[in-house]
Image: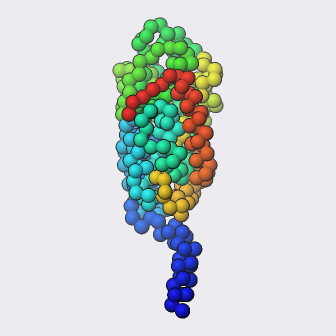
Amino acid sequence: MRIVLQAVMVVVLAAVWPALAQQQYPVKPVRLIVPFAPGGPNDILGRLVGQKLTEQWGQPVIIENRGGAGGTIGLEAAVRSPKDGYTLAMGGTSNLTVAPSLYEKLTYDPLKDVTPIINVAAVPYALAVNPTVPAKTARELIPIASRKTGYLSYGSSGMGSMSSLAAELFKSMSKTQIVHVPYKGTAPALTDVVSGQIDLMFADLALIKPFAERGRLRAIGVTGLKRSVAMKELPTVAESGLPGYDIEPWFGVITTEGAPRAVVTRVNAAIAAALKSPDVLQRLAALGYEPLGGTPEQFAATIKSDISKYATVVKAAGIKAEL
């Protein structure tokens, strides 16, 4: 009888354990790695997600900024963490879909080492120049950038980042030569564009907008195929001088491969709920970000399809980077 009862208990526990694990998680603080320097869109979204998870769970979600190498350093730290779901990371277009074709010695495989949880938001980028650059559209910028090699310089948040990829695609399509000055983060690069140390940058529209409104930067165009609600008057780069140009990054939450499915489901549900709350929607709208959401499977499909998409972009632009 005892053996039978033990067998029954094993079957019952096996059936209810995933639900119990989902209810119990998290029983301790959760680490959320933001693989970029403070101040950029990945950091802004990471802190927003961390705040809402802390509110829902009653457990601290600790933000850890680990920038460098286009976001690959922080993402590698996340995927090498214990497979318990207590280390999350803000993955993005650069380190999940561009990196595989950009770096020959990438230390992780986004399709094998990552468990996608939820795509959080699409982030419109824009091209901005220092006001001393006499261009108001992409059409006017191209001949200026074509005068001679090295006549203009652009800043980025690091080699392999979306800001550098956006600029390199622009250079490739417009047949111009603009010198790349990489930084460890968006904020320091943008600061030097404002001060005139460098001439231009492709960056998060929400960061560019305040400087543009004060006349300290001139926004030329958004990088996606449609205008942003944040600056409806600003045309796309494609419609203002470079037809076919299209770059629009997104950022989502991932964890390491092998994390419990119940934990992944719980994190997905918590962030999905946050993306529907009025305060989050208001915050995203103010930034011009588009909330995404969806299932882990949908996020995985986006990562897979975008790896193919950006492999074509990287090859066409002739971009190579070293870790």
Is the residue 222 above or below the residue 274 in the image? above
**Residue 131 vs residue 267, the one in the foreground:** 267
Q: Quadrant of the N terminus?
A: bottom right
In percent of width and height, residue 240 lies at 61, 19
Picture residue at 53% right of the left edge, 58% below the top? 264
Colour pattern of the rendering? rainbow
**Residue 232 vs residue 251, the one in the foreground:** 251
Q: Residue furthest bottom?
A: 1
Q: Is residue 172 left or right of residue 47?
A: right
In percent of width and height, residue 219 lies at 51, 24
Is the residue 28 above or below the residue 69 in the image? below
Q: Is residue 46 left or right of residue 121?
A: left
Residue 220 visible somewhere in the drawing: no
Looking at the rendered structure, the number of numbered marks drawn on it comes to 0
Q: Quadrant of the C terminus?
A: top left
Residue 84 visible somewhere in the drawing: yes
**Residue 303 vs residue 289, the one in the foreground:** 303
Picture residue at 56% right of the left edge, 27% below the top? 313
In percent of width and height, residue 107 lies at 41, 41
